[in-house]
Amino acid sequence: MKLTLNTFAFLALFSLVLSSCKGANDTPSPTPPLADRRPFHVVMASGSASPSTTLLQATNDPFKGELSFAGKGFTINTSRAPHLGFPSDGSYISVLYYRDSKLEKYVYDASLPGQYKREGQTLMLDARYGKGLRFKQVNDKLGSVHEAIGVYKNVDASKPEVLEGVTTFNVAMIDMLEVKANTDTWQVDMPVQMPEEISGKKGYVITRADSPVIDGAYIYYGINIGKFDAKKPDGKAVESQYTGTLVLDYPALTNPKVVLHPEQLGATNGYRTPTMYKSSDGYIYQLADNTKVTSIVRLKEGKYDTSFRYNLTEKLGIKGSRSFGWFYVGDGIGYIPYQDQSKPQAQIGVDPEGNPTYTSAFGIARMDLRRGTVVNLEVPEGLWLQQYQTAAVRDGKIYFALATFGKPGHIHIYDIKSANPIPTLGTKLSPSGADQYYIGVF
C-alpha cells in the first residue's frame, strides 16, 4: 500500500491529550545502572513513499538528554522507505534500498560523534532478482532477501479464457558480517507448491512473503494470499482471509510449500515489523491479521497447533484492530503496536488506484501468551506505527521511540518483567516535521 503522509496533520484530531502519556512523569527519570553500555540508536524516517530518507542518531544514555533531528542526524537516502535489519546486539544496521535492490551495512563510528560508516561492499541484487526484493534480519549474522511473485497465466492452450495462478519464490541468504550472498543456495523462480484449497486453478497466488524464521531444518516465511479478481482492470489479486506459512528446507532453500491454518485469520507477512519468532518452548509464534481481528497463532515442525490462538482484539475489548508486526521478548511476553479501530479514522493518503486510505491511531499492548492476558500500555495519543521497525531489548527493558506527529516525544521504557502500563520517559525527542515519523530504537 502506497501511503502519503503529507496530510498527517490530521493526527491533531487524536492529540487532545498531547504527546505526554497519562500517568507518566514528563521529566526523564534518573538514570538507573546500565549493565550494557553500548550506544542506543534512534531511527527516524522522512518520506513514507518516494523518495525517502532514513536518519540515525546515537545516545549513550536513553534515560536522559535530548535528540533533535532538525537538520541533524546521519542520513541514508533511498527511493522508497527502506527495509532495515538489526542484530540483537545493535552492532550494525542492514539497509535494503527497496525498489533499488541494493543492500548495505552501516556501523556507528564512535570516533566521529553522530556519524555512521558503510562497512563492506554494496550488494547489487537487481540483476538476478529484480526490483521487488524484501529483507529481514534472520539472526545476528544472516539476513534474507526474498520475494514471492504471483501471476496469472493461460496454462491450458485448450482453454485460453481460463487464467490460473502461478506463484514463484526468489530467495538468498546474506552473510551480513561479510556483506556477501551465499551463491551456493540462492534460488530464482522456484515454483511454490500450494494446497488444494488455494491452488492456482482456484485463482490463488502468494502476493507477499516476509519475516523469516529458521527452525532446525526449515525456514518459515509469513505470507499474504490473494485471489484473482476479474473485475479489477488489471486482473490483480485481492487479499483473501486465508492464513498460511511458506516453508522451505534449510539451509538448501528448496522445496517451497504452503501450510494452511484451518481458520481464516488473515495474512502473516506483516509490513516492516517482524511477525514471527521462535520461543524457548519450541514453537514459532506468528501474527495473523485480517484487518479487523488480530491474532497470534503458533507452529511446530511445519504444522499449525490448532489448540492455540491468542485473540488480541477480543482481549482488548475493542471493535476492531489491525497490526503489522510485534516484538517478542521471551517467556511468552510480546509487545504489539496495533491500530485501534474503535477510534476515529482520518485520511492519510491514497492507494495505487487513487482511492482514499484511512487509519485510526495506534496503541501498544503487552501480551502474555502463556497466561492469555493483555495490558494496554500508556503511549502518546495519535501515533502512526505502520512502518515501525525495531524496539531495543536490553537490561530487562524494552525501548520505543514514540512521538505524536508535530509534537515532542520520548524514548518510552517498559520493564519487561512487569505488567505496569506506565513507562519511564527517557531521552526527549524533537518534534517530527511533515511526513516524518520515528521508526525504532536499536
Image (tube, helix red, strand yellow):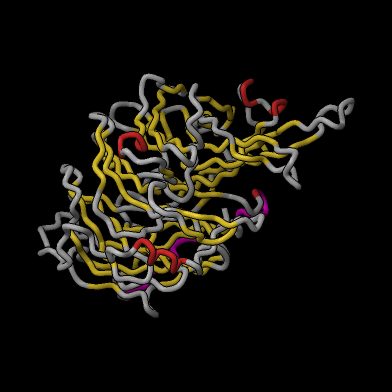
Q: Residue at x 34, y 45 (%)?
A: 336
Give the residues in magenta. Answer: 114-128
The residue positioned farthest toward the bottom in the image shown: 71
* 403 to 275, vertically: above or below: below
Residue 373 visible here: yes
Taking 230 as reference, is 346 left or right? Answer: left
Give the x, y percent position of residue 212: 46, 39
The residue positioned farthest toward the right in the image shown: 158
Q: Residue at x 12, y 63 (%)?
A: 29
Count of numbered circles in the view: 0
Is residue 438 one of those drawn in magenta?
A: no
Taking 89 as reference, is 295 left or right? Answer: right
* 295 to 412, vertically: above or below: above
Give the x, y percent position of residue 198: 63, 26
Taking 369 as reference, is 359 left or right? Answer: right
Q: Nearer the viewer, residue 201 or 350?
A: 350
Which image quarter: residue 411? bottom left
Is residue 127 one of those drawn in magenta?
A: yes
Give the x, y percent position of residue 130: 66, 51
Q: Residue at x 35, y 58 (%)?
A: 440
Give the x, y percent position of residue 317: 32, 38
* 19 to 222, vertically: above or below: below
